[in-house]
Image: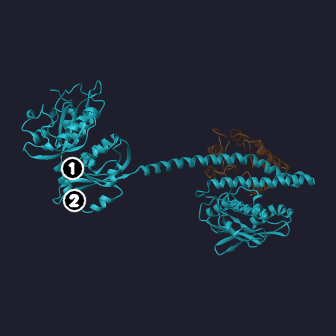
Chain colours: A brown, B cyan
Amino acid sequence: MKILMIDDLSEITSPFEFVFKSKGHEFTATHTVNDGLKMIKENKYDFIILDIDFGEDKPDAAWLLDKLSEINILEKQKIAILTNSTNQKEINICLTKGAIKAWLKEENIFMIYKEIEKMVNN
Amino acid sequence: MKKISINYCFLITTLFNEWFIFFLLKKEFNDPMIPRIGGITGSHIEDSIISIYRVIDKDGIIQQCNDEYVKHFAQSEKEIIGKTIFQNLHSSQQDIEHTSFENWKNSGRITRRVLNLKTKNEEYHKFFVTGRNIRDEGNNKIIARQDVLREFAQIEITREKLRNFQYQNLYKNSPDMYRTVNSTGVIVDCNKAYYEKLGYEYDEVIGDHFLDHTATDSQEIMTDNMVNWRKNGTIKTEEIRMLKKDGSTFPAMLTPSTIYDDDGKLFGRNIIIKDINELNELKQELTSRDELDAIKEELLFMVTHELRSPLSPLTHWCQILQNPEMVGELSKVQKHAVEMMGKNLKRLSLHINELFDAMRLDQQINFPTQKFDVKKMMDEFYKNWVGEINDKKIKFVNSTSEEIILESSENKIEQVLTSLLINAIDFTNPRNGLIEIGAREIDDNILFFVKDNGIGIPEDMKKKIFEKFVKFDDDTYRELGGTGLGLFVANGIIKNLNGRIWVDSKLGTETIFQFTLPKKFKGQKMENVNL
């Protein structure tokens, strides 16, 4: 699998990087939404793990989903939200804009891995 | 002769209305924008008003009066101007009026009084008399006084009609303020609630104009209201500020109704006045509370987000270290250390969730719900805990056997089960301890339970066990940790999921926490969300 994870904190992405790479998958982490957008435009990923909030006044998940929709590549992507936020409104917005799944970051990492594997293979 | 300046432009358009003129005069003398007299100069008072006016100087000499005054007391203005105010006064009131006059000269205070004055017909009539000071615009000293006289008989006629009016008892004893005004706006009656609230005695109120009890910033709206009522009979509820005797004001809701006599002739208005201060305060409080709730919610999201952020890499690395496929076999000590970290991270995560939920459970929360397999969830839950519980030499059993599909919040149910299980672990004796979990279908509900053979819960604690911050006083319980929020939150979550939670316990024998949830949740559904 070719995975892209967009999260502003490297300490969040590093255990995922370890798990995916250990299982033989290609994994890239990026820490800003703008970089994420650029990478999605240039590459085809099997799955994208996306944080919601990237700090005040910075492009967030909803912004990225809108941008991908504008350039007609959202449909080709499988994007899931991974967040610490329990703000349901924020999550709902992302699901409405095209994210296919939402997890809390405290979920078991292997459970998330298994679900991603399943979604990519479907 | 010294005369007073009056704003005529306005008067010309509204001369038909006695009350309106009165208002104007009142406004004139109170309005700091209108040049004040420097000595008594200017025009004389408008002729066509019904109320009776005169202006007297500090010697008690009448310097000016209106036509109504002339009509009542003399054949012509000449007979009045330059005469003393005591001239027409009944002999029995001379002393009182002299005292009142001297008092005004010395202090500027004008006493409201009923005077027996001789009219031009040589008959004595009673008049309510009030007044307003006229000041020198240069040094602001009182230089004269404008007296307003209202015929007692006119007021009495209205009052007599009112005496025959139904529901007098209701009027008099109502806790709401009632006042009745005649067609010119003079108060002819009021109830106890009214005069007490405004700080007056009953007799002080009768004969006052209603504007005397209206705060300055509400006088315009009341003026318009009165004009409209007189012009076309329209009445409407108004929110204004009332003026009390001590000068303070309060917000009030005025609901007027027109009163007609037996001939169908309009003769006044009844006004119900409600003090809406408390209502306004309540409104303000609710607004502040809404704002506070929004801030609280925002702060809560921020704090829990910040607390969870460091927790997630710790938890994930811990899970990785516990997986031999990832990092190989750990030594005994390493394995123990990682297990301890994992266990405590689980508790920390639970406490953060409890804290977060406890702060928002005072309102309805729509937890995202999905359809899920209960047996699968219970098996997974059992697998996550069996190691830790067995390490404590406690037997752990999952007796869920049925395949059940439930539509609810899987994560929140797990949170409740975790909370109940941690309680069971804490209160179960390691020697021959037994904890059993399970779920089964009962009619349209799913029953979950967590049962232990621990120390049990005292009878008096059972009733308050689901309250916030409840902890046991007994030393046996005190040494155990926890936020004191676990069961409170569990109760809140189950209620929000339209379920019910309860506890049965026998001291020293067993405790069983049970909760039921409807198979099909009727609230907000959200697939693909694990929150």
Q: Earlier in the sequence, mark 1 or mark 2?
A: 2
Query: Quadrant location of the C terminus of chain B?
Result: bottom right
- In which image quadrant can residue B91 be found? top left
Mark 1 residue element: loop
Residue of label 1 = B183
Q: Amino acid at mark 1?
A: Ser
The x, y position of residue B329, in whole percent, is 92, 54
Q: Position of residue B14 (x, y in %)?
A: 20, 40
Q: In the rendered view, tell whether residue B321 sits above or below residue B424.
A: above
Local crowd size for mark 1, using a 10 Å CA cut-off: few (<14), some (14–19), many (≥20): some
Whether A64 is drawn above or below A108: the answer is: above
Residue B360 x %, y %: 62, 54
Q: Nearer the viewer, residue B39 or B276?
A: B39
| Residue B448 visible from this viewpoint | yes
- Give the chain of mark 2: B
Q: CA distance from mark 1 to mark 2?
A: 17 Å
Q: Nearer the viewer, mark 1 or mark 2?
A: 2
Residue at 21% x, 32% y is B6
Image coordinates for residue A42, horizontal then vertical, percent: 72, 41
Q: Which mark is residue B163?
A: 2
Q: What is the crowding at mark 2: few (fewer than 14 residues within 10 Å), some, or many (at least 20)?
A: few
Instruction: Please state which amino acid type lies under the numbered disc 2.
Output: Arg
Q: Is residue B214 left or right of residue A76?
A: left
